[in-house]
Image (cartoon, rainbow, N blue to C red):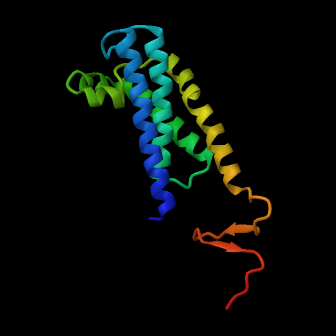
Amino acid sequence: MSTGHLRIRLLMLAAGVGFLAVALTIRAVTAGTLNSTGRLEQYSGTALYASMSYVGVLFLWPRRSPLATAGIAWAWCWAMECFQLTGIPGELSTRSLLARLVLGVQFDRTDLLWYPAGIVPLVLLHWLVRRSARQVPSGAPEARVSRGGVRARRGAGRG
């Protein structure tokens, strides 16, 4: 694993923990418990769950493009939401807080509309970061990255 991938993974881990902390703080401050009784807790929790899914995909596959990452994260969110129709996540959630946080409790079609609110801003940020990383500073030799991740300068001789 390259140093760059390790750095991305650590950043994505920190982002995921940050999103979780924000979601739990919103619930604790507004509801006083981890229950999502109000709209703010429900909708922010859904969007932040989608954000955690996005950074989770980047944690696992740091080289994924923004659109591929979004597609995987969105598919995960929808799969978990549809899985709730079986009743299994609801049953598991009564026994485990971790199951409740990861799988949810019951299907809510409104959640399907809130997942993009957590994914789209990260797609834009991811795209901007990738775009700025590809730009070469003025005055610096033009560089390209090979498939192996090794930087090569144009005009650099071999040998």
Q: Residue furthest left?
A: 95
Compared across the picture, whether 113 is left or right of 105 comes to right
Observer able to see residue 36: no
Question: Is 29 placed above or below 148 here?
Answer: above
Q: How many discs appear?
A: 0
Q: Could you say where residue 118 lies in the image, as x and y percent from the top left?
A: 54, 29
Compared across the picture, whether 129 is left or right of 102 comes to right
Question: Is 55 placed above or below 88 here?
Answer: below
Q: Could you say where residue 12 lies in the image, as x and y percent from the top left?
A: 47, 44
Q: Could you say where residue 98 lies in the image, as x and y percent from the top left?
A: 28, 31
Q: Quadrant of the C terminus?
A: bottom right
- Residue at coordinates 76% horizontally, 68% vertically from top-left? 142
Compared across the picture, whether 91 is left or right of 16 comes to left
Camera-nearest residue between 51 and 108: 51
- Residue at coordinates 43% horizontally, 37% vertically from top-left? 16
Q: Quadrant of the N terminus?
A: bottom left
Q: Residue furthest bottom?
A: 159
| Image quadrant assignment for residue 141 | bottom right
Observer able to see residue 137: yes
Question: Is 82 placed above or below 5 here?
Answer: above
Camera-nearest residue between 93 and 54: 54
- Residue at coordinates 75% horizontally, 58% vertically from top-left? 137
Question: Is 45 placed above or below 53 here?
Answer: above
- Residue at coordinates 44% horizontally, 21% vertically from top-left? 45
